[in-house]
Image: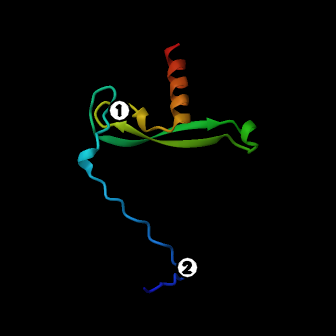
Amino acid sequence: MKIHELNPNQQPQPQQVQIDLSTSKPILCEKCGYDTFISGVKARKISKLLTGSPQDMILPIDVLLCGDCGTVIQELLPEQIKELYRMDNAKEEN
C-alpha cells in the first residue's frame, strides 16, 4: 500500500456524487406550471441609521422568476426572504 503525501498547497478533490435524474421531480411555477426560470434580482434598502454608514445600503437578493409569467419562485427562496416577500405582498394588498 502506498501512502501519498499531499502538497500543503494542494486541496483534496471533492468526490463526485452520482445522481439518477429519473428519481428527481421538476420544480414548477406555482401560478402557471411552467418549468423554465430566469434570473432576477430583488433589492432591499437598509437605512444608513441602522448601518452607521454615510449612505443607505442596497442589498441585492438573487431570485428565480418563471420564464412564462414572471412569478417569483418562492420555493427556492431562503426562509428569511420568503417572510419578507410575504410581508411586502401583504402591504401591497392593503
> Residue 59's x, y, as percent?
58, 42
Callout 2 crowding tier (Cα within 10 Å): few <14, some 14–19, many ≥20: few
Q: How is the image coloured?
A: rainbow
Q: Residue at x 50, y 22 (%)?
A: 89
Disc on res. 70: 1
> Residue 5's x, y, as percent?
51, 84
Q: Residue at x 47, y 37 (%)?
A: 77
> Residue 79's x, y, as percent?
52, 35
Q: CA distance from mark 1 to mark 2?
A: 45 Å
Q: Under tag 1, what secondary structure?
A: loop
Q: Residue at x 51, y 42 (%)?
A: 61
Say what amino acid the circle numbered 1 marks: Gly
Disc on res. 9: 2
Circles 1 and 2 in contact, beta carbons < 8 Å = no
Most extreme residue toward the left is 22
Quadrant in which the N terminus is drawn? bottom left
Left of 2 or right of it: where is 94?
right
Q: Residue at x 52, y 81 (%)?
A: 6
Disc on res. 89: none
Is residue 37 or residue 40 the one in the foreground? Answer: 37
Q: Under tag 2, what secondary structure?
A: loop
Residue 24: quadrant of the picture = top left
Q: Nearer the viewer, mark 1 or mark 2?
A: 2
Left of 23 or right of it: where is 44?
right
Left of 84 or right of it: where is 34?
left
Residue 46: quadrant of the picture = top right
Specify which label sits upstream in the sequence, 1 or 2: 2
Is residue 11 or residue 52 the one in the foreground? Answer: 11
